[in-house]
Image (cartoon, helix red, strand yellow):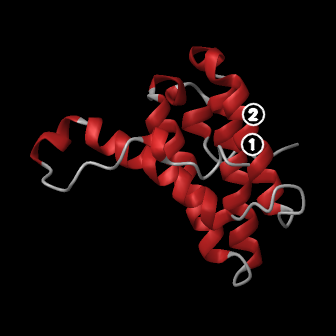
Amino acid sequence: MEQIYHKEAASGRWYSLTLAEQMGHIGSEVSRAARKQGKHEQLYERAVDRAFELLDLTINDSRWRFRLKELVRVREILADAVLGGQAYNSHLADLDNYFLYFALMARNSSPQSATDTRPVPPCIATNHGIAGH
């Protein structure tokens, strides 16, 4: 049986998050994986598993049906990066950068962002990290 890492998210909490929040959380796992890659195999594999688990929850979120093609493409590119980048020359560091914009968007959309004085990130549409593949 497949291990569930994010039990609270899988039980329904995930579906109350915005797309930016979901993608930001996925990006946290991608970032962890990128930092552990080649250094600590067990932690790397767990982070990769968690990233796929969260991405699959997002893909299954019916609110994002109109984004399904993009989400499945992100999954394909993540798989390519994990398997060595043979098909698309994908790297976890590139995906980390892609997901970072979602995390920043989620942070800047949160209620506590009203007191945050850090600069707003550029529009996600200007990030071609995945669109160029």
- Residue located 18% across and 42% down the image: 112
- Residue located 65% across and 43% down the image: 131
* Residue in front for this viewpoint, 12 or 75: 75
- Residue located 47% across and 54% down the image: 100
Q: Distance between the residues labelled 1 and 2?
A: 5 Å
Is 113 on the left-hand or right-hand side of 4? left
- Residue located 71% across and 65% down the image: 91
> Which x, y percent locates residue 17?
45, 29
Crowding around mark 1 (Cα neighbors within 10 Å: few <14, some 14 to 19, many 20+) is some
The total number of labels drawn is: 2
Crowding around mark 2 (Cα neighbors within 10 Å: few <14, some 14 to 19, many 20+) is some
Kind of residue at badge 2: Val
Callout 1–callout 2 Cβ contact below 8 Å: yes
> Which x, y percent locates residue 103?
42, 48
Which corner quadrant holds the N terminus?
top right
> Which x, y percent locates residue 32?
58, 66
Kindly identify which numbered label has been placed on residue 72.
2
Disc 1 designates what residue?
75
Is 117 on the left-hand or right-hand side of 27? left
Kind of residue at badge 1: Arg
Q: State the SS at label 1.
A: helix
Is 85 on the left-hand or right-hand side of 7? right
Q: Which residue reaches farthest bottom?
A: 39
- Whether 67 is drawn above or below 118: the answer is above
Is 128 on the left-hand or right-hand side of 107? right
- Whether 72 is drawn above or below 128: the answer is above
Q: State the SS at label 2.
A: helix
Quarter where residue 48 is shown: bottom right
> Which x, y percent locates residue 29?
59, 57
Quarter where residue 67 is shown: top right
